[in-house]
Amino acid sequence: MRLTMKERQSVIAVMQERYRKAGKKLKCQILHECCRLTGYNRAYASHLLCHYKPALKRKAKAQSPSPGKKTLTPHYDGKVRRLVPKLIGSVGKLVKRGRTIASVVLLAREIIKGTARH
């Protein structure tokens, strides 16, 4: 009978501590024992014993109140919506020309203030 995934993960976690502190001969024995218990290939077991990090527990996703399509509410007013495409176009042109980040930021500030030369 094979071990479940959680059982194999716990075996690796326990053996990992011993493996890291062990010398070469003892590492060979631990690796052999790990392969026998888990059924993993020797190279994969060695990798896990050196690099294994337990997976973080994931939070369950919250259910949306309406299971249909979500309705988007606007976060910005019309002025910002008009400026964004202009800003993106200008930044794209500067990046293609090989300008520095500083010049891109300065142009973005000018466009937002409304003082940019086009």
Image (cartoon, rainbow, N blue to C red):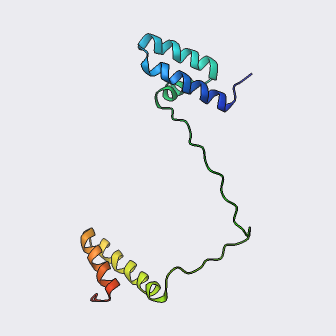
- Give the total of numbered labels: 0
Q: Is residue 94 visible?
A: yes
Q: Position of residue 20 (x, y in %)?
A: 44, 22
Q: Nearer the viewer, residue 78 or 100?
A: 78
In the picture, the quarter occupied by the N terminus is top right
Against 80, residue 70 (above or below) is above
- Tell me if 98 is positioned left or right of 57 in this view: left
Q: Position of residue 4 (x, y in %)?
A: 69, 29
Residue plotted at (51% across, 12% down):
29
Q: Residue at 28% across / 79% down in the picture?
A: 107
Quadrant in which the C terminus is drawn: bottom left
* 43 versus 108 height, above or below: above
Q: Please report the residue visible at 44 percent of the width from the left and 87 percent of the height from the top.
A: 82
Q: Is residue 69 left or right of residue 101?
A: right
* Left/right of residue 8 with respect to residue 19 in the rendered view: right
Residue 2 location (% of width, % of height): 71, 24
Q: Residue at x 62, y 50 (%)?
A: 59
Location of residue 45 (image quadrant): top right
Is residue 99 among what the camera can see?
no
Single out the residue that lies furthest toward the top. 25
Residue 114, given in percent of the width and then of the height, sits at 32, 89
